[in-house]
Image (tube, rainbow, N blue to C red):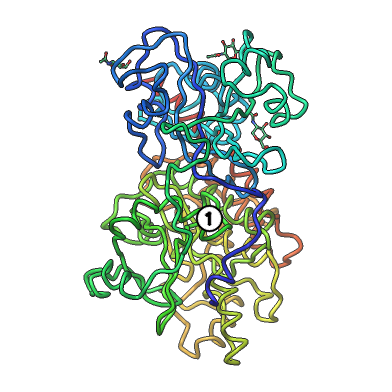
Amino acid sequence: MLASKSFIAESKCSKTCDLALASCYLLKGTNLTYISDIMKSKVLLKREDIVSYNTDTVPNKDSFIGDSRVNVPFPCDCINDEFLGHTFLYQHQQKDTYASISEFTFSNLTTKERMERDNVYAENSIPKFVNVNVNVTVNCSCGNRKVSKDYGLFITYPLRKEDTLESNANDTEIEADLLQRYNPGVNFSQGSGLVFIPGKDSNGDTESKFIVVDKSPEFSYEELANATNNFSLANKIGQGGFGEVYYGELKGKRQENYIAEMKVLTSVHHRNLVRLIGYCIEGSLFLVYEYMDNGSLSQHLHNSAKEPLTWSTRLRIALDVARGLEYIHDHSVPVYIHRDIKSDNILLNGNFNGKIADFGMTKLSDVASSTDNTDHVVGTFGYMPPENAYGHISRKIDVYAFGVVMYELISAKAAVVKIDKPSTEFELKSLEMKTNESIDEYKSLVALFDEVIDQDGDPIEEGLRKLVDPRLGDNYSIDSIKKMTQLAKACINRDPKQRPTMRSVVVSLMTLNRIDSAALSLAMEHH
Ligand SMILES: *[C@@H]1O[C@H](CO)[C@@H](O)[C@H](O)[C@H]1NC(C)=O
Ligand SMILES: *[C@@H]1O[C@H](CO)[C@@H](O)[C@H](O)[C@H]1NC(C)=O
Ligand SMILES: *[C@@H]1O[C@H](CO)[C@@H](O)[C@H](O)[C@H]1NC(C)=O
């Protein structure tokens, strides 16, 4: 039971459900093909699904609808553990702005402000040359048992100027008083804003049953053995600090319930943390994680067989990781310190979004070591701050390690680098103590960067350029690299109190990402 205990924490979403409906207002000449194309998400929306929720208005998927509303089913998730909603991935079109996407394409189901917060690109500076997905977050509701126990499926409904409480009550056949109690204090005639209205599914049911939830996160040994070909060598994809890692395919019912399960299994979720899907305890402890298509950041930086990551991608991955860390430091309940941040523990999904892996593992191993009384060493050399030696544990340990990761992103060098000439750096003394090996040929990445930073803490351009990953060629902005170097330098300050919080690191990286994407779209216009 070790695993489940360590991973489950309180969530701010008091109640969750699997399904909600989004009321989209369609202009003349639109059909459901269009709707299912724009409202893309991780779960496949089948056109037939949409039809089944709109039998009154839409006879089939090809029929045209115009100037009317359709209800689009979507999974109602707990976003950042803070509120109920779902993030759609919308493929950005040439002329789109956040205002046009929110007000027209998504019929005011979201707002321009929300989109600005959920996307790293500034308004009007979304790169135009690739099919960029932008995040569109739509709120949802799972009802409120204090208001009524009869309804569990809710429509997220953007009010338009023709709406009133009475017209809504008439259209939905729900009493006006009940509508108002589900939306306390909301004036239905205000012409804008969201309300939540009880809905019905294709069978006329008012409960949400879209995805059948199998509540148990526990897998049997047999299921895992089947999924991984009996833990065959061919399925082994890695060796983590805590055990072996296998790729497995969960077939049949399990797979269908994948998304619903993730939600109930662990309540600490965030888009920048690798999700724990489940566990099995039969002899050993097995943990089931979401599969990350592009492997680890470390592989991409240090393995020349992989395409080099562009500077923009590196900037974005840095922001992703910073957001994940900020989340576990400040927002998850309870808060966590990762204690082993390194490029091996940063995984990349199909879109090269960075996610932190092995999160919660330290906690788990703490519990394990306190029972068998072994002293578990946490952390990886090259990423550990000086105070680690004295056992001082604080969030600032992760901030330090993250600083080293930023140096890695710039240089594509490992945290401890083999060099030609012997080093006399003080920094290396601790390495000697740790490994009892000859350390003459090694140097920490931190020490390498220290050599190109002047007395005032400013990077020296000439030296810095020599440290930049040669595989970037000339495709980087030295200004951007200087800024990241300064930020990393602040993160690796010897005095933990002087290091920034992850919150302020996120803010700095957001600015860097904005400047970068603005420069990119400018460059494209000039072509
Ligand atoms: C439905 O709309 C899409 C996009 O607007 C369009 O390309 C397609 O031809 C339409 N389908 C039919 C059957 O008219
Ligand atoms: C969205 O809201 C704006 C401003 O209130 C309004 O002009 C626009 O028509 C709305 N869009 C839809 C599809 O209702
Ligand atoms: C969605 O919910 C969040 C959190 O409760 C709230 O801050 C935001 O205003 C809501 N968005 C809309 C469009 O109502």
- Look at 50% across and 91% down and name the residue there: 436
Viewport quadrant of the C terminus: top left
- In this rendered view, identify the residue nearer to me: 182 or 336: 182
Residue 161 visible to the viewer? yes
- In this rendered view, identify the residue nearer to me: 521 or 335: 335
Q: What residue type is labelled 1?
A: Met
- Image coordinates of residue 441 in percent, x first then y, are 44, 78
- In this rendered view, identify the residue nearer to me: 149 or 112: 149
- Look at 42% across and 18% down and name the residue there: 56
- Image coordinates of residue 217 in percent, x first then y, are 46, 64
What residue is disc 1 on?
406
- Image coordinates of residue 104 in percent, x first then y, are 50, 16
Task: Answer left or right for 348 relative to 85.
Answer: left
- Image coordinates of residue 173 in percent, x first then y, are 58, 21
Indicate the secondary structure of the residue bearing disc 1.
Answer: helix
Task: Answer left or right for 301 relative to 207.
Answer: left
Please tell me whether residue 156 is drawn above or below residue 103 in the rendered image. Answer: below
- In this rendered view, identify the residue nearer to me: 238 or 335: 335
